[in-house]
Amino acid sequence: MSASDAVPALDERDHWGSRLGLILAMAGNAVGLGNFLRFPNEAVRAGEGFMTAYFVCLVLLGLPLMWMEWSLGRRGGRLGYSTAPGMLQSLTSLRAVRYLGAIGIVMPLLIVIYYVYIESWTLGYAYQAATGELGASIGATQAHLAEYTGASGGFAGHAEWMGSTTAYTFLGITLLVNLFVLSRGVMKGIEIVAKVGMPLLVLIAVALTARVMTLPDQDGREVADGLALFWTPNIERLFSSGAEVIWLAAAGQIFFSLSVGSGAIGTFASYLTDDDDVALTGLTTVSANEFCEVILGGTLAIPAAYLFFGSEQVAEIAQSSMALAFVTMPDIFASMPMLGGEAGPASVQVFGTMWFGLLFVAGITSSLALSQPAMAFFQDLLGISRGVATLIVGAIITLCVQPIVLVPGVLEEVDYWAGTFGLVVFSLVEVVLLMWVFGARRAWGELHRGAEIRIPRMFFWIMTWVTPAILFVMLGFWGWNQALPILSMERSPGGGDYSLAARHGAWIARGMMMGLLAFVVVLIAVASKRGRFDAVMALHDEEDGA
Amino acid sequence: MTTPEPQMTMGAWIFLAIGWFAVTTLAVWCFRRVLRPDRSDDDG
């Protein structure tokens, strides 16, 4: 069988309707809760010098990995594969590599499972803000969040996490909206949501940022001074003892924010045609994400929190993204006068609806992107129709989200392994296979196929040596300092102790993650038996013969 | 002991201005190039 025999034509698979749609969908994938919640929190926690480290990591990790995933995705698509097992197999004839691709299916799916739950909170809160219910809770926003989620003791404690009717109702709605869009496919579903959602998101974020930056001084504090918490370019701190905390925070933020290493970028890029540009398009995605993160995300929550609460309380607030979004921000809105109006429940209604609406839009574009690898896996490798694939993905999320809703500690554990650690591991797998096994020169040529810009040559060396070296150092540092205490649950990923309840949750989370991984590995074996990798193996045979 | 309140120094303002300018310029340049009307492959 020749390689071309088993390659499905692009018009038989999902594809993009327009380039703008593709870029907005990619930007929607990258722009998520991480831009508006995680970024300002990480920046404040790391402190002065963070932004310098952040920009260095963007150039040495973010941009190279983005370009690599675009190239890898388009190459996979050319051979008829939209997911990691096929894409990685296209780089080498070593059969075991396809099983490594299971990480690129399971990890985004695991992230979606908890992401959808948090996304549903933003929808619930947007609804409650719009109806005035949230405005009535001012002064007791922590208790309101506990009541909403069904967690006794508040979010930080959540000793008895039960899942309230309200939380379940909005979770159900959010899940159904996600599944409906997924069932419509890439062009008629994801692309349309991105085309409507992304401009709306930028519009709301710009309006909120403009209001925050024009707020009058409070107790002698100027809103702009809140920016000094992380924009002060303290270069000395980056080379002093303890600087690794700043560098790791910056690198972790780049991974999470750009969604590199999650498998979703490759899947989206696989719907390109063979000679579509990926160099300029990849750079455009990064630029859109950075605009939303550095300028909009960095200028909203933290400066506002600093203005109303001062730097000491901001440091405490920054310990939890959830507390910032769902407790602090409603409190801030209650004190934030509308233009020409008064502060109070009405301002919570207006600004709260905008803020939680913004988070919901940012969340849904990301959750759709993160669900697509699993959708494509069932469709392309197992030959299942889109409708049935939607039902399977929906069933997995519905089943696996239950422990996240009901058992404390599960969400944090899954977030750590899938949303933080896993991104670094899978990025390393991709970069080593692409740049070292497939070959740096071939990868560079792949990146420049149909390119509309010439990428500076220095990136060839960065992608070949610097990016993998940084990833190895990050994992080595983790292995040396954190692996044992975290694996044995002596210390939580956040640095504190595991409570007994969190320990139970962590075991459930680990069981769930390993179970899903095993499930996908078995399915890859089934796909192998059905000859789904024959096309790419034939290609390797042809290359070896030549 | 209370933490001193942060203040935007001249250095911080210059760094912020460079960062914002670089990010905005890159985004505008990229989108202008991507959405150029003379592109022939806009329909995917």
Image (cartoon, coloured by chain):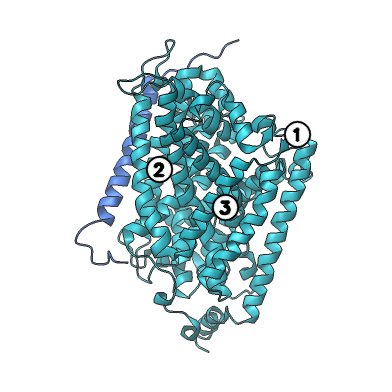
Confirm whether residue A449 shows in the render. yes
> Residue A112, which numbered label?
3
- Which quadrant of the structure image shows residue A20? bottom left
Type of the residue with mark 1: Asp
Question: In this rendering, which labeled residue sits more in front, label 2 or label 3?
Answer: 3
Report which residue position mark 1 lands on: A497
In what element is the residue under mark 3?
helix
Report which residue position mark 2 lands on: A290
Q: Where A341 falls versus A468 (above or below)? A: above
Q: Looking at the colours in the rendered structure, which chain would you say is drawn in cyan?
A: A
Place of residue A126 in the rendered image (x, y in percent of width and height, measured from the top left): 47, 38
Place of residue B35 in the rendered image (x, y in percent of width and height, measured from the top left): 26, 56
Type of the residue with mark 3: Val
Q: Chain of mark 3?
A: A
Give the residue drawn at x 57%, y 56%.
A108
Give the residue drawn at x 52%, y 50%.
A174
Q: Looking at the colours in the rendered structure, which chain would you say is drawn in blue?
A: B
Check if mark 1's residue and mark 2's residue have beta carbons within 8 Å: no
Discs 1 and 2 lie in a common subunit: yes
Q: Mark 3 or mark 2, which is nearer the start of the sequence?
A: 3
Place of residue A375 in the rendered image (x, y in percent of width and height, measured from the top left): 54, 65
